[in-house]
Image (cartoon, coloured by chain):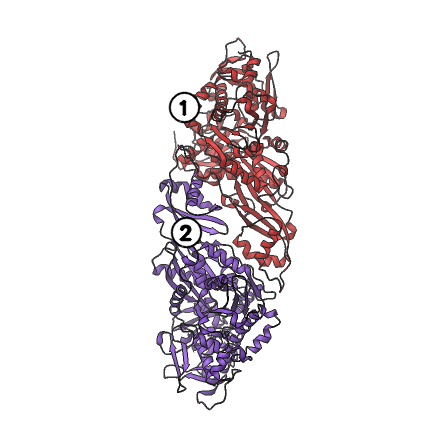
Chain colours: A red, B purple
């Protein structure tokens, strides 16, 4: 049925109305990508995650057979976009579940949470931003003071800040004399920190002294968050977030590396993330009526792979033994070199990473939670697409990464979703056995985000609906039924307009595997450093769970060590918090580099004890109940 | 007679055969410039130097009246190119006097002189070039050593050299991992010094470790000299020189600044000097069969204006009170940014200057002669288009510049010429009163270069042909005749094939003015520092005079203080020597910067005593004969 390759087909996507012309034979997922439409896809287009379902309203197509569609779905012309080729002009309906509303990502809460966690950055580190604008009022030269313009500028800068080694861009130098004379030696100099060198980035007439902005970015595998900072007042003036549009190429970064390698799509991968960052910056700038030229710095934190994608560094060896990054410490570069649309001479900084699987987001977390300053031992846990763990104090720091999957980000869970509008972020079983919940935006639930999944797993366990291995117990509850993928529990019944919300055995297995990975990593680090639970003075849990993370439930399921709850704190997105801290203080960047250099990385894949710990943590809360006395008390040793 | 502006005229130049099409009305000097032909022109086209004479063989033209042509010349269709407009197709003969042979500039002697003066650079400064190639043999990563590639590279570099602060170019970083894997972690890293930062300029497969070259350049107002250096062995492997092709725009740099300002010709001015430098580099590279990509650094020394022209920095304020440079300390830049054709990531360094009129050539001279290291006081005198003077020891250094004109470079002297083939470089009056001389290349004399002019002035004085004011004495000598420009003395009679060589009263006045300016500058500095002639332990005389500079005659005419001759040394081109020294040692560059910063500049134009000293030095040797006891003895107080 496949027709001539040369034939062009127009594909209309509804309800967006977007259309694209593609050659006959193009895969529908690829057509959607080209049209700029986001379709969920965990597997990167390999046809086994079943996330990229769309409805064909009109047109000819060819689909590979799949077991991921129900007979009903097939009857209703639902197809997997990644397994479907376009053969004629088509009209496609993209189900609402794909229609992400980026404005609903919860970054305001994170911005607030950061301010309560870290206090005033100025109190943590002296306000001394990586890029700053100095008002310089120089005396014009005279016969008795014929110092050259360039040296005169340096003298004036050094009167205000410490800058033993300085450098000036050639184009700046070429225009300097004319500018100084025209401005009668009253100018605003934008200077940036590049390693130990202070670079004169721009010189403008004096009246523009106060206008200086920067952007801090968290490069998440799933979500990219940007905060716009006023560098004169050190205040966050706006925040915005978007989904990482690399998601089309796979929901975890290993998948994306493989995709890029197989399709030589490194440039495309860079374009995606750079466009995401640019879109955020433009959105923030337009909303705040700021000229992009007045944004002179961008600081990024993220996992090692994401930083590699952003800069188009070779990420392929991250996924192969011995798991080597191209660079952990990326020198500051001109943002324009990476395609970032801020001031054309503005600088791009990336926080340093520790290893291929412990990125600068973790360094940012350690920096923000200040565990590197404390005499007592703290544990930092960041649940994202991977689960990363850092442990230590002011004398030592160890870290590890467990690749146990992104279940708590809502991936690999049937009704899992990110912490956006309609997500169940809080859930409990009422005394009568019914399920109570709260959604983000208080709308009808369309899925469950990380904090809701944590609650769900804990409540199913506490209420005896699943056993300690995470298996559903046959109990006669009519909400427990046999679904397409085995047993499933109905959390929210369907209505005429909305589908039901269920949790399946496969979902629970994924969630247990994730928490087991995190806890095993914690155990390995604690064992290696002979740290006992009672030695832990604080646990900081970071990640994009949602607003109402129930710390108790994180202990109940055995994700975190069982220590007094008041010692455990949910700290939200510490990656962006760290990026902001570094942006506002040269000292903080130095500190981040010291943290990254000083942290000992444990490679769990080659660690002899890890698999054992992982298996033991594959129970709720753990095989060894003595590790979870508080849980034992609640569940009566179920 | 001027015709329609639109008409195009073709101008043929003989004997070169070059031709150019220009609009009717174009000035002939401009047409020659466009055709790529060098015509002498001191005044920059203002019609008063009379140097740009050419012969019109055919065609219509319009010339402004001038007194600089003899009736005979006018009859023979000789015109001043700068005062003549093209009105039709023309054929022009360019006289031989314009036909410069660049290969005859004496740079080999300078190269040799430098080696005898400064000794082994490695003895003066540790061999530690600004740009170097390091052979790096790294261990490939393992599970137990997963250091990222970029950090691995830094560790390997730091095992070989001190580099506390490092930076890597973004493009290098992007290609690093692939290269390291392919080269099995055996690479050659080219690293360059940029202020306090060590930059990784290039990384290549390991086999190219030994191939690394650089160029040292003296940016003279008249002559540009380049030495090709092997950075692995620190040896000079070839030298080349060319005339500065900005000369068409005026023979001194003030004229050129004015020309550039009036004609908005800053880009053109930069193109000229950059092309000169590129031509030298290409010539050297081709002759030595070196790939331009293997030349990774260029170090330039020159007067402040010339460095400004090279980099297209604003030079206009150099010529206006309070005489300010755009930059005295130019940061290292990528050579390609200035249009220099070496390795596209290679670095361009300029030695620092002291002030608008004391350039990096003088800093290079102080560095090379090592007067900044000595306990005793030395005097450094550089005679070029201006005469610059530095005085001091290891504790203090002062300097000044006299703008007394380029007479000793052969400009402003009827038969003056640069130190090239056919130039009289040595001259004396024999006992029988006849004139003996030696020319460069031992050919028939076509003019007199600096050392010959020095001899001429001294011999005319010693032999009583001119008096102490420099005026010809009527003495009945038939060689003293009335020429077009007043009295003149015939040094070499004409032959059938060659014109006579004379020295005119105007020539002598120019020479005396030049030497007076230099000596007055010396006196101002010595007075200001209370240095007496007997305090001077050494005088170093630098400049492009010729090979046989007679030091005694420099004292006889009162250019240099009268101290024992063995304390006076002719040191040739110290500008290029300094550029080479800096190229081969980071410490030398630091030292040059310290010298430039530490030197006190005396602005003679605003100095109250200068004019008085200048008038007193306008005699041969001086009004105060007690300052020149040895001269008084020779001339019997004439």
Chain of the residue on which disc 2 is drawn: B
Q: Position of residue B608 (x, y in %)?
A: 62, 71
Disc count in the image? 2
Are circles 2 and 1 on residues that touch, CB within 8 Å?
no
**Residue B28 visible, this angle:** yes
Q: Position of residue A591 (x, y in %)?
A: 55, 38
Q: Nearer the viewer, residue A450 or A416?
A: A450
Q: Which subunit holds the residue at mark 1? A: A
Q: Are marks 2 and 1 on the same chain?
A: no
Q: Is residue B416 visible?
A: no
User: Is label 1 in a helix, a strand or a loop?
Assistant: loop
Q: Secondary structure beneath disc 2?
A: strand
Q: Residues within 10 Å of mark 2 (few under 14, many from 20)?
A: many
Residue A259: image tag? none
Image coords of residue B36 (percent x, y): 43, 67
As displayed, is residue B325 above or below residue A617? below
- Which numbered marker is on residue B132? 2
Identify which residue, A451 or A193, lies in the foreground.
Answer: A193
In this rendering, the answer to whether B208 lies above or below B529 is: above
Q: Is residue B326 above or below residue A447?
A: below
Q: Residue furthest top?
A: A476
Q: Name the quadrant of the N terminus of chain A.
A: top left
Q: Within 10 angstroms of label 1, few (less than 14), some, or many (20 or more) residues?
A: few
Residue at point 61%, 11% (across, down) = A432
Please indicate whether residue A317 sits to the left or right of residue A216 in the image: left
Q: Residue A276: horizontal and vertical position, in percent?
A: 53, 37
Using the image as rendered, state which of residue A36 and residue A521 is in the foreground: A521
Q: Mark 1 = which residue? A: A65
Left or right: where B272 falls relative to A538 = left
Disc 2 from disc 1: Cα separation: 62 Å
């Amino acid at each position: 049925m496949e027709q001539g390759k040369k034939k062009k087909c127009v594909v209309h996507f509804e309800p967006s109305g977007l259309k694209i012309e593609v050659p006959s034979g193009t895969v529908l997922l690829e057509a959607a990508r080209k049209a700029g439409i986001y379709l969920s896809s965990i597997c990167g287009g390999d046809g086994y995650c079943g996330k990229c379902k769309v409805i064909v309203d009109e047109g000819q197509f060819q689909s590979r057979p799949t077991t991921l569609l129900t007979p009903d779905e097939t009857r209703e012309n639902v197809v997997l976009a990644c397994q479907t080729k376009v053969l004629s002009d088509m009209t496609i309906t993209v189900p609402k579940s794909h229609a992400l509303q980026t404005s609903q990502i919860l970054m305001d809460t994170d911005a607030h949470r950061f301010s309560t966690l870290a206090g005033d950055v100025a109190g943590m580190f002296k306000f001394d931003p990586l890029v700053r604008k100095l008002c310089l009022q120089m005396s014009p030269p005279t016969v008795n003071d014929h110092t050259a313009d360039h040296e005169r500028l340096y003298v004036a800068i050094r009167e205000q800040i410490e800058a033993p080694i300085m450098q000036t861009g050639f184009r700046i130098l070429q225009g300097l004399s004319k500018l100084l004379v025209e401005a009668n030696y009253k100018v605003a100099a934008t200077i940036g920190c590049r390693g130990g060198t202070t670079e004169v980035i721009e010189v403008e007439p004096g009246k523009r002294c106060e206008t200086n902005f920067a952007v801090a970015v968290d490069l998440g595998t799933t979500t990219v968050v940007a905060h716009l900072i006023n560098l004169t007042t050190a205040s966050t003036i706006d925040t915005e977030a978007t989904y990482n549009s690399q998601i089309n190429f796979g929901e975890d970064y290993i998948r994306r590396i493989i995709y890029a390698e197989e399709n030589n799509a490194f440039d495309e991968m860079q374009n995606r993330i750079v466009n995401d960052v640019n879109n955020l910056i433009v959105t923030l700038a337009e909303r705040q009526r700021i000229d992009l030229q007045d944004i002179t710095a961008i600081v990024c934190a993220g996992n090692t792979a994401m930083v590699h994608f952003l800069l188009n560094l070779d990420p392929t060896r991250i996924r192969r033994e011995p798991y080597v990054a191209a660079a952990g410490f990326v020198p500051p570069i001109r943002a324009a070199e990476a395609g970032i649309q801020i001031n054309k001479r503005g600088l791009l900084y990336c926080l340093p990473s520790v290893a291929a699987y412990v990125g600068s987001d973790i360094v940012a977390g350690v920096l923000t939670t200040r565990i590197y300053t404390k005499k007592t031992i703290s544990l930092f846990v960041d649940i994202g697409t991977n689960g990363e763990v850092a442990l230590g104090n002011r004398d030592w720091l160890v870290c590890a990464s467990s690749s146990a999957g992104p279940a708590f980000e809502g991936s690999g869970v049937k009704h899992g979703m990110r912490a956006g509008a309609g997500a169940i972020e809080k859930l409990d079983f009422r005394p009568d056995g019914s399920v109570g919940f709260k959604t983000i935006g208080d709308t009808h639930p369309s899925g469950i985000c990380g904090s809701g999944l944590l609650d769900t797993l804990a409540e199913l366990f506490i209420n005896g609906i699943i056993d300690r291995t995470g298996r559903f117990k046959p109990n006669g509850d009519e909400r427990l039924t046999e679904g397409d993928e085995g047993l499933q529990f109905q959390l929210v019944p369907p209505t005429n307009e909305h589908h039901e919300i269920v949790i399946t055995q496969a979902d629970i297995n994924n969630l247990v595997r994730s928490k087991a990975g995190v806890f095993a990593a914690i155990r390995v680090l604690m064992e290696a450093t002979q740290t006992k639970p009672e030695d832990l003075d604080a646990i900081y849990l970071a990640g994009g769970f949602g607003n109402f993370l129930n710390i108790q439930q994180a202990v109940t399921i055995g994700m975190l060590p069982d220590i007094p709850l008041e010692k455990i704190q949910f700290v939200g997105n510490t990656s962006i918090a760290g990026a902001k801290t570094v942006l506002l203080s040269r000292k903080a960047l130095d500190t981040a580099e010291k943290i990254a250099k000083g942290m000992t990385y444990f490679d769990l894949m080659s660690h002899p004890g890890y698999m054992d710990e992982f298996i033991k943590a594959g129970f709720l809360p753990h095989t060894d109940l003595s590790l979870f006395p508080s849980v034992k008390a609640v569940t009566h040793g179920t």
